[in-house]
């Protein structure tokens, strides 16, 4: 059973997404390895998808998507 993900509509409106906020579908998520400051996540990515919020630094994958960060904070995924 997929988890229902609820995110504030103002946050969604202020967070442009080239993938139509696919993270809200409740599918498979990239694993969060660590938080970096208050607005970034270090990730282990499942899929290689183009995303304006995904950056690499050496072998590290960094996500600065405010919607994905909120999903992690609220649901632990």
Image: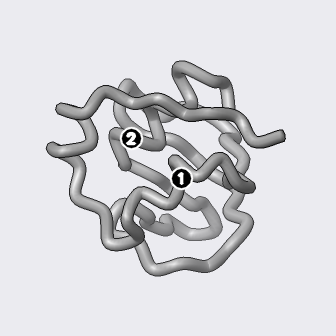
The answer to whether 63 is drawn above or below residue 5 in the figure is below
The x, y position of residue 38, in whole percent, is 37, 25
In the image shown, does 62 or 52 lie closer to the viewer?
Answer: 52
| Dot 2: element | helix
Label 1 or label 2, whichever comes before in sequence order: 1
Q: Distance between the residues labelled 1 and 2?
A: 8 Å
Q: Mark 1 points at which residue?
A: 23
* Residue pictured at 23% horizontal, 49% vertical: 15
* Residue pictured at 47% horizontal, 29% vertical: 6
Do callouts 1 and 2 mark residues in contact (Cβ within 8 Å)? yes
The x, y position of residue 16, in whole percent, is 22, 58
Q: In this view, does 50 lie to the left or right of 47?
A: left
Residue 76: quadrant of the picture:
top right
In the image shown, does 27 or 1 lie closer to the viewer?
Answer: 1
* Residue pictured at 36% horizontal, 60% vertical: 53
Number of the label disc, if any, that sits on residue 67: 2
Residue 60: quadrant of the picture:
bottom right
| Dot 1: element | helix
The x, y position of residue 34, in whole percent, is 63, 35
């Amino acid at each position: 059973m997929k988890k229902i993900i609820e995110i504030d509509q103002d946050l969604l409106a202020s967070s442009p997404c080239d993938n139509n906020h696919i993270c809200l579908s409740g599918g498979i998520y990239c694993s969060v390895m660590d938080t970096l400051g208050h607005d970034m996540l270090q990730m282990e990515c499942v899929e290689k998808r183009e995303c304006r919020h995904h950056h690499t630094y050496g072998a590290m994958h960094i996500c600065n998507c405010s919607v994905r960060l909120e999903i992690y904070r609220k649901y632990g995924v």
